[in-house]
């Protein structure tokens, strides 16, 4: 992934923001901790294109999160389409969120009791534009 990532002009957390990613051949990153103590990002995806570029996104989102929400985020691959372009195992979830590119990433936020919460779940295609609905 290149170091360039563009967000839409509006910082409104209720908007869908798009971030442009590039370099689809980037190697996977098994784990990463941001320089900021309040956020740990775990990368779990053998086809992952997620990298340090995501840290600024979560630093921005941190300001919109309630204080009782933990700042650990785990990424899990969603298989919207298989390698033949047919619906994958996560197709119902993907289609309900209007995501149809393969692979996609679902982001779970962890609350202070270590429970996963969907309050800030975000969906997006790893290739091309990634949409975060927060």
Image (tube, rainbow, N blue to C red):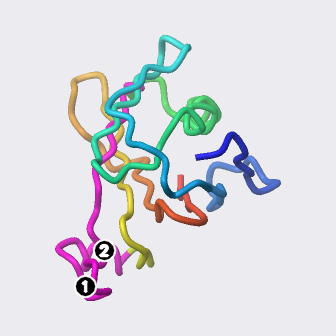
In the image, the segment drawn in magenta is: 70-96
Where does residue 74 sit, x and y in percent of width and height?
Answer: 32, 38
Of 87 and 61, which appears nearest the observer?
87
Identify the residue at image location x=58%, y=66%.
Answer: 128
Decide if residue 89 is on the left or right side of residue 74: left
Of 28 and 100, which appears nearest the observer?
28
Residue marked by disc 1: 87
User: Compared with residue 50, is residue 69 higher up or lower down, i.e. above or below?
Assistant: above
Asked whether 36 falls inside the magenta stretch, the response is no
Identify the residue at image location x=39%, y=35%.
Answer: 29
Pointer 2: residues within 10 angstroms few (<14), some, or many (20+)?
Answer: many
Residue 80, labelled with which disc? 2
Q: CA distance from mark 2 to mark 1?
A: 6 Å
Decide if residue 133 is on the left or right side of residue 71: right
Secondary element under disc 2, as helix, strand or loop, is loop
Identify the residue at image location x=53%, y=52%.
Answer: 134
Asked whether 84 falls inside the magenta stretch, the response is yes
In the rendered image, which quarter is residue 3 located in?
top right
Task: Spot the residue most to the left.
Answer: 89
Where does residue 53 sit, x and y in percent of width and height?
Answer: 60, 38
Secondary element under disc 1, as helix, strand or loop, is loop
Where does residue 16 sit, x and y in percent of width and height?
Answer: 62, 62
Where does residue 36 sit, x and y in percent of width and height?
Answer: 55, 14
User: Compared with residue 17, is residue 110 higher up or lower down, i.e. above or below?
Assistant: above
User: Compared with residue 15, is residue 57 higher up or lower down, i.e. above or below?
Assistant: above
Identify the residue at image location x=70%, y=47%.
Answer: 5
Residues at circles 2 and 1 in contact by the CB criterion of under 8 Å: yes
User: Compared with residue 17, is residue 68 higher up or lower down, i.e. above or below?
Assistant: above
């Amino acid at each position: 992934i290149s170091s360039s990532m563009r967000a839409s002009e509006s910082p409104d957390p209720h908007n869908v923001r798009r971030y442009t990613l590039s370099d689809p051949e980037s190697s996977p990153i098994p784990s990463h901790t941001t320089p900021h103590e309040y956020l740990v990002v775990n990368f779990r995806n053998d086809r992952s294109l997620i990298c340090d570029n995501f840290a600024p996104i979560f630093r921005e989102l941190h300001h919109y999160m309630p204080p009782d929400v933990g700042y650990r985020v785990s990424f899990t691959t969603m298989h919207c389409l298989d390698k033949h372009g047919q619906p994958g195992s996560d197709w119902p979830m993907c289609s309900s969120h209007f995501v149809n590119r393969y692979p996609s990433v679902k982001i779970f936020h962890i609350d202070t009791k270590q429970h996963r919460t969907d309050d800030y779940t975000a969906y997006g295609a790893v290739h091309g534009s990634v949409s975060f609905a927060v």
